Image (cartoon, rainbow, N blue to C red):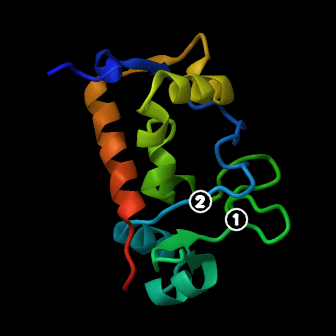
C-alpha cells in the first residue's frame, strides 16, 4: 500500500494575525461534543445554553458554529484577525490546513498552499506525518458532528 504524500511531513507555521482560514464568508465549522463542552466552559455557560447562543444546525441536524450575521465569517474572529477563543477553539479549526478535503488531491493541496501563508513561510517547521494523521482524524470526527446534546 502506498503511503499518503504527506507522511514525510509538511512545512507549516500558523502566522500571527493572519486569520485567513477564519475570515472566509460562508465557512462552516462542524463541532464535536467535546468542542461544545470546551467552548461552553470557556464562556462559563452550560452547554445547551451555549449551543443555543453560538450555534445552528445543518439540514441534517449537526451542530455548527454560527457565523457573524453581517460579514458571514467566524463569530470568534476579532477585528485584528485574531481568534478570541484560540485555546478553546473547535477541533476542526486546530486541524487546518490538514483537512481531508485539502489533502485529497494535488489540485486541492495546491489551492490550500496558495491560500494559506503558513504553508509558504520560510520559517515554517515540519509537521510530521503522525501529527497530520491526527489532524485528519480530528477533521473527520468534526465532520460527523453530533445532533443531540
Which of the pair 59/114 is nearer the observer? 59
Residue 125, position in %: x, y? 46, 18
Q: Residues within 10 Å of mark 2 (few under 14, many from 20)?
A: some
Element assignment for label 2? loop
> In the figure, residue 31 lies in which quadrant?
bottom left
Q: Which residue is mark 1?
A: 75
Element assignment for label 1? loop
> In the figure, residue 37 lies in which quadrant?
bottom left
Residue 143, position in %: x, y? 41, 59
Query: Marks 2/1: CA distance?
Result: 11 Å
The numbered mark, 2 or 1, whose residue comes first in the sequence reads 2
Q: Is residue 121 visible?
A: yes
Q: Which residue is mark 2?
A: 28
Which of the pair 104/136 is nearer the observer? 104
Q: Measuring 54% from the left and 82% from the top, which residue is drawn there?
A: 50
* Quadrant position of the C terminus in the picture: bottom left
Which of the pair 7/105 is nearer the observer? 105
Residue 64, position in %: x, y? 53, 70
Q: Measuring 50% from the left and 23% from the top, which residue is drawn there?
A: 12
In the rendered image, the vertical position of residue 45 relative to residue 87, given as above or below: below
Residue 17, position in %: x, y? 72, 38
Amino acid at each position: 500500500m502506498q503511503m499518503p504524500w504527506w507522511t514525510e511531513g509538511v512545512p507549516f507555521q500558523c502566522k500571527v494575525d493572519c486569520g485567513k482560514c477564519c475570515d472566509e464568508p460562508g465557512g462552516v465549522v462542524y463541532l464535536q461534543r467535546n468542542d461544545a463542552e470546551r467552548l461552553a466552559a470557556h464562556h462559563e455557560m452550560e452547554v445547551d445554553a451555549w449551543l443555543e447562543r453560538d450555534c445552528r444546525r445543518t439540514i441534517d441536524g449537526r451542530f455548527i458554529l454560527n457565523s457573524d450575521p453581517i460579514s458571514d465569517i467566524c463569530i470568534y474572529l476579532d477585528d485584528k484577525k485574531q481568534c478570541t477563543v484560540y485555546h478553546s477553539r473547535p477541533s476542526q479549526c486546530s486541524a487546518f490546513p490538514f483537512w481531508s478535503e485539502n489533502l485529497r488531491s494535488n489540485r486541492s493541496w495546491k489551492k490550500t498552499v496558495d491560500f494559506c501563508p503558513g504553508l509558504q513561510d520560510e520559517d515554517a517547521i515540519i509537521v510530521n506525518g503522525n501529527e497530520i494523521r491526527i489532524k485528519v482524524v480530528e477533521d473527520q470526527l468534526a465532520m460527523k458532528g453530533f445532533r443531540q446534546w
